[in-house]
Amino acid sequence: MVKENQKDFLQVLGYLFLRSGKIGKALVLFEALQQLSPADPQVSRSLCYTYLLTQQYEQALSQADKFLREASEGTSKKIGYLFKSRALWGLGQKEEARRMMTWFLDFKETRNAADSS
């Protein structure tokens, strides 16, 4: 089992790999983290994003669904709808992708209205 601070370090390292264009290294790292922390929504989110960057849309869709199941309600969950929309679009499922994008936009508008009250 990986300790929390070790997992955080590996997450940051994966982010740095992405920022420096080493997407393949980031992908290997995030896939390993997924094995070590299968129920961590942040790992699912990072892995989903990396799959999108590498145009692995089936895997991205699977991770987006996993992230949506794991993430707590709130503003962080809306990114799951955005990622799912992008994966569906990449798979050619345009109508479903539009529906997910609508959920993303509605979620954002609902949160903004609640925050301004």
Image (cartoon, rainbow, N blue to C red):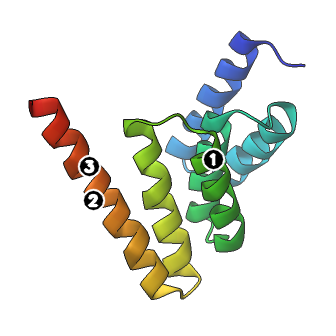
Residue 73 image point, x, y percent:
46, 37
Whole-percent x and y of residue 76?
Answer: 43, 38
Q: Which amino acid, by three-letter code, is at mark 1?
A: Arg
**Please, what secondary structure does the residue beneath circle 1 have?**
helix
Q: Residue at x 45, y 86 (%)?
A: 94
Q: Disc 2 vs disc 3: Cβ atoms closer than 8 Å? A: yes
* Above or below, 90 relative to 11: below
Q: Say whether residue 87 is left or right of residue 63.
A: left
Up-down: is 64 above or below 75?
A: below
Query: Which is nearer the N-term, disc 2 or disc 1?
Result: 1
Residue 17 location, x and y as percent? 61, 40
> Which image quadrant is residue 58 in?
bottom right
Residue 69: assigned label: 1
CA–CA distance between discs 2 and 1? 19 Å
Q: Nearer the viewer, residue 47 or 9?
A: 47
Q: Residue sitting at 20 percent across and 51 percent down? A: 109
Q: Give the residue number, with chain letter if any, for mark 3.
A: 108
In the image, what residue occupies the spot 24% across and 41% down? 111
> Which residue is labeled 2 in the image?
105
Q: Which type of secondary structure does the marked residue at label 2 adopt? A: helix
